[in-house]
Image (cartoon, rainbow, N blue to C red):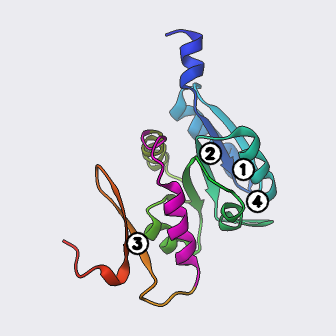
Amino acid sequence: YTKNKQQHDAMKILLIDNEKEVRLILKDMVAAWSNGQHIIEEADGVATGIAKINSLQPDIVLLDVEMNDGTGFDLLKQITNPSFQLIFTTAHNQYAIQAIKFSAIDYLLKPIDPVELNNSLQKAKENINNQTLQQQLAVLMQQLLPKTETEKQIVIKDIDKTYFLKMNDILYCE
């Protein structure tokens, strides 16, 4: 296992949270998961997060929902063609969590459980080449807007594929 091979396999992980203590704890947990093989960087809000995303081009972003200069959703609205895996981190905001669930984007509730973080990071790592994030974000943003029942969508995943379904088209689930 050469140094070049190790660098080639290194993922870039960006932690965006307005609370410094949360970022430090998250950074330690992500570093433990990655065994020091991955690049881990931080940002403290929407503006710094956008700048870091543009400069770092991360593979995985852990994003707080509510920050001092806006929300994680505000940040996402300003990113064109996102190519990273997204994991939301939040302490509250049930409405946002419901929207995230509908879009099938992963989220972790604070205080963050290390086992759940490891599972989310592993899932994100496996999905790195999956190009459905833009569609999932579109569904997420739709869920955040007031909609009639006929306009609502849900994302459903199975082992092979991701499906984007209109709520009105679903007769039943089994």
Q: Position of residue 75 (x, y in %)?
A: 71, 61
**In this view of the protein, which residue sits in the foreground, 64 or 159?**
159
Q: Which residue sits at x=23%, y=74%?
A: 173
Alpha carbon distance from label 3 to label 2: 29 Å
**In this view of the protein, which residue sits in the foreground, 1 or 145?**
145
Q: In the rendered image, which quarter contains the C terminus?
A: bottom left
Q: Residues within 10 Å of mark 4 (few under 14, many from 20)?
A: many
Q: Nearer the viewer, mark 3 or mark 4?
A: 3
Alpha carbon distance from label 1 to label 3: 34 Å
User: Mark 2 is on which residue type?
Assistant: Leu
Above-or-below relation of 19 to 103: above
Pick whichever of labels 3 and 2 is earlier in the sequence.
Answer: 2
Alpha carbon distance from label 1 to label 2: 9 Å
Above-or-below relation of 38 to 156: above
Which quadrant of the structure image shows residue 145? bottom right
The residue labelled by disc 3 is 154
Dot label at residue 132: none
Q: Regarding mark 3 in the picture, which secondary structure is present there? A: strand
Q: Contact (CB < 8 A) between labels 1 and 2?
A: no
Above-or-below relation of 70 to 62: below
- Part of the protein shown in magenta: 126-145
Pick whichever of labels 1 and 4 is earlier in the sequence.
Answer: 1
Above-or-below relation of 150 to 4: below
Pick whichever of labels 2 and 4 is earlier in the sequence.
Answer: 2
Q: Which residue sits at x=64%, y=41%?
A: 58
Q: Regarding mark 4 in the picture, which secondary structure is present there? A: helix
**In this view of the protein, which residue sits in the foreground, 63 or 166?**
166
The residue labelled by disc 4 is 46
Apparent side of residue 142 relative to residue 77 in the rendered image (left or right)? left
Alpha carbon distance from label 1 to label 4: 18 Å
User: Mark 4 is on which residue type?
Assistant: Val
Dot label at residue 21: 1
